[in-house]
């Protein structure tokens, strides 16, 4: 994959504005927005565009941290997100609405803190939507300090936080701070700082490394079978095949374990399950590779046998 490409995973509950944010960053309507009562992204979607000379891949996710949705229905989308972001994202954008924090919001924040490892937090940014609710002259840092839940989350993210308004801040305002153009530049600069602070590397772990290895194996096979496909088409096809294979392997594994393994959840009950998930997947990859080698060996043996018969 392009080493200069920045992979950014957008996280947040349903209706917080993840798809709108992705469209704002790219400056075009690539991600579908549903304003119905049952709104929200239902499928993981990834798109790549050039922004200010930088190749960026945005990965829009379903509401992984919704407290009122069945985790089981999210399993395939969690796996899809893992695959699309492999070998790992350069940044996580944690979206929250700029509003009074209710018990429901507190539960979402607590869930985010529970799932993220300290390592993953090094790549995370808290981004508030609905910035029009910010009081005149107030900066987002001032607003965050007034709530202990938000303040704790932002602190875990290295103090990184920004604010946008997908609806009202698209014009040229008198106050530069209340401009999506200004805020997007600040956000992209923060992402570059994260990359620099992490020595140019992306966030990764054993699961993401193993998934990327599987994708690359699928890519090699596709290249052998298809001569007229572009590298982008090959990558997408390899990702789709990998999603199916990972899902087939993870039957019976809870979505909490999958998400925890992806985000590097600290060891604990779910963390131990996540370790088992990773061990199982790595074992699956080893077994699959061994099976491939066995088939090749059998073919070579058969060819040698036929060659001997021909010489006789």
Image (tube, rainbow, N blue to C red):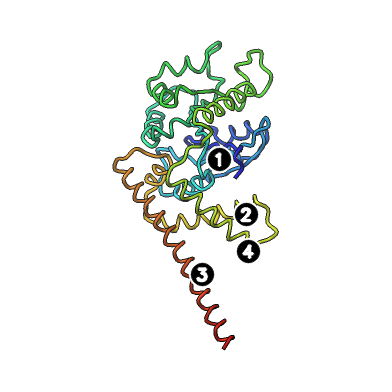
Sequence order check, earlier mark of 2 and 4: 4
| Residue on which the image places disc 3 | 296
Q: Label 4 vs label 1: CA separation?
A: 29 Å
Distance of label 3 from label 2 (alpha carbons): 24 Å
**Residue highlighted by disc 1:** 59
**Helix or strand or loop: what does disc 3 sit on?**
helix
Q: Nearer the viewer, mark 2 or mark 1?
A: 2
Assess disc 1: are there few (<14), some (14-19) or many (≥20) residues with their C-alpha within 10 Å of its C-alpha: many
Label 1, secondary structure: give it.
strand
- Quarter-wise, where is residue 281 in the image? bottom left
Spot the residue most to the top: 137
Q: Are marks 2 and 4 in contact (CB under 8 Å)?
A: no
Q: Secondary structure at mark 2?
A: helix
Q: Quadrant of the N terminus?
A: top right
Q: Quadrant of the C terminus?
A: bottom right
Residue placed under numbered mark 2 in the picture: 234
> In the rendering, at what x and y percent does residue 245 appear?
48, 58
Q: Position of residue 270 (x, y in %)?
A: 32, 43
């Amino acid at each position: 994959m392009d080493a200069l490409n920045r992979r950014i995973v957008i996280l947040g509950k349903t209706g917080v504005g993840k798809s709108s944010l992705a469209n704002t960053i790219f400056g075009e309507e690539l991600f579908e927005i549903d304003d119905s009562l049952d709104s929200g992204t239902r499928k993981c979607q990834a798109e790549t565009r050039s922004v200010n000379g930088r190749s960026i891949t945005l990965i829009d996710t379903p509401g992984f941290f919704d407290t009122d949705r069945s985790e089981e229905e999210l399993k395939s989308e969690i796996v899809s997100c893992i695959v699309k972001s492999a070998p790992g994202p350069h940044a996580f954008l944690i979206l929250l609405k700029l509003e009074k924090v209710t018990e429901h919001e507190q539960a979402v924040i607590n869930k985010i803190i529970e799932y993220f490892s300290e390592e993953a937090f090094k790549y995370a940014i808290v981004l508030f939507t609905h910035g029009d609710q910010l009081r005149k002259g107030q900066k987002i840092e001032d607003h965050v300090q007034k709530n202990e839940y938000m303040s704790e989350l932002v602190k875990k993210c290295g103090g990184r936080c920004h604010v946008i308004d997908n609806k009202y801040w698209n014009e040229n305002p008198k106050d530069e701070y209340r401009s999506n153009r200004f805020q997007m530049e600040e956000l992209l600069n923060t992402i570059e700082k994260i990359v620099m602070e992490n020595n140019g590397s992306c966030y990764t772990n054993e699961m993401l490394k193993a998934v990327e290895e599987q994708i690359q194996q699928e890519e090699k096979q596709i290249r052998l079978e298809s001569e007229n496909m572009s590298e982008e088409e090959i990558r997408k096809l390899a990702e789709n095949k990998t999603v199916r294979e990972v899902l087939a392997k993870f039957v019976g594994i809870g979505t909490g374990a999958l998400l925890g393994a992806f985000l590097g959840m600290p060891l604990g009950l779910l963390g131990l399950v996540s370790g088992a998930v990773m061990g199982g997947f790595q074992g699956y990859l080893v077994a699959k590779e061994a099976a491939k080698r066995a088939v090749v060996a059998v073919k070579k043996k058969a060819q040698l046998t036929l060659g001997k018969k021909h010489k006789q």
